[in-house]
Image (spheres, rainbow, N blue to C red):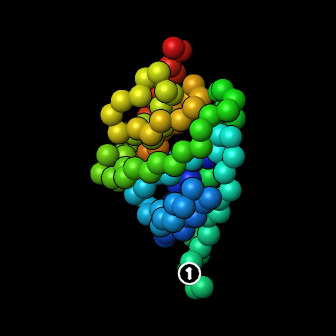
Amino acid sequence: MEIISVALKRTLSHKDSMDNKRVIEVVEIQVMSTGTGLTHSEFNDSKTDAVNFIQIWIILEEMRVIPSYERCKFEAINRGSKLQTIEKQKDNFKGEALLINQQVYIYRSDLEVNASLDLIIKTE
């Protein structure tokens, strides 16, 4: 699986069997490829504050991928009422995106009240 974690409110802690121990901040996206095998956990270190986050699981395009871990900051200033690419398929990897092992695009935006966006669906 390709596992994408996005902290929406407060921080989320992560640890895995590749010795990655990180705190995922609200401005960060974490991508993990479990590939040929990996154990991991995401958890809230706070005993008083709730964490709000999204975790997306995507089936790998190819089998026997080497496990990997990556994260990147995506500043909120780049999301205001416009689309911000947070993941790109491996053949078009460029810019402020994280590589995943599947042909998929994922976008993020912070829409202002009564704002709308047009999205042109990529076909290649």
The image quadrant of residue 42 is bottom right
Observer able to see residue 103 = yes
Q: Position of residue 55 (x, y in %)?
A: 62, 52
Q: Position of residue 54 (x, y in %)?
A: 60, 54
Q: Which residue is mark 1?
A: 46
Q: How many marks?
A: 1
Q: Nearer the viewer, residue 37 or 94?
A: 37
- In the rendered view, tell whether residue 22 sits above or below residue 60: below
Residue drawn at 48 percent across, 65 percent down: 22
Asked whether the viewer can see residue 113, the reply is: no
Look at the numbered disc 1 and give the secondary structure of its residue: loop
Residue closest to the eye, 95 or 41:
41
Front residue (pair 22, 115)? 22
Q: Quadrant of residue 65?
A: top right
- From the top left corner, tell me how far across and down residue 12 is, in percent: 54, 67
Q: Residue furthest top?
A: 124
Residue at left offset 44%, top offset 39%: 98
Task: Indicate the amino acid at tag 1.
Answer: Ser
Q: Residue at x 54, y 61 (%)?
A: 19
Q: Quadrant of the N terminus?
A: top right
The furthest residue to the bottom: 48
The 10 Å Cα crowd at callout 1, few under 14, some 14 to 19, many 20 or more, is few
Instruction: Report x, y in % for residue 16.
Output: 60, 60
Instruction: Residue at 57%, 56% (x, y): give it.
Output: 18
Q: Residue furthest left?
A: 77
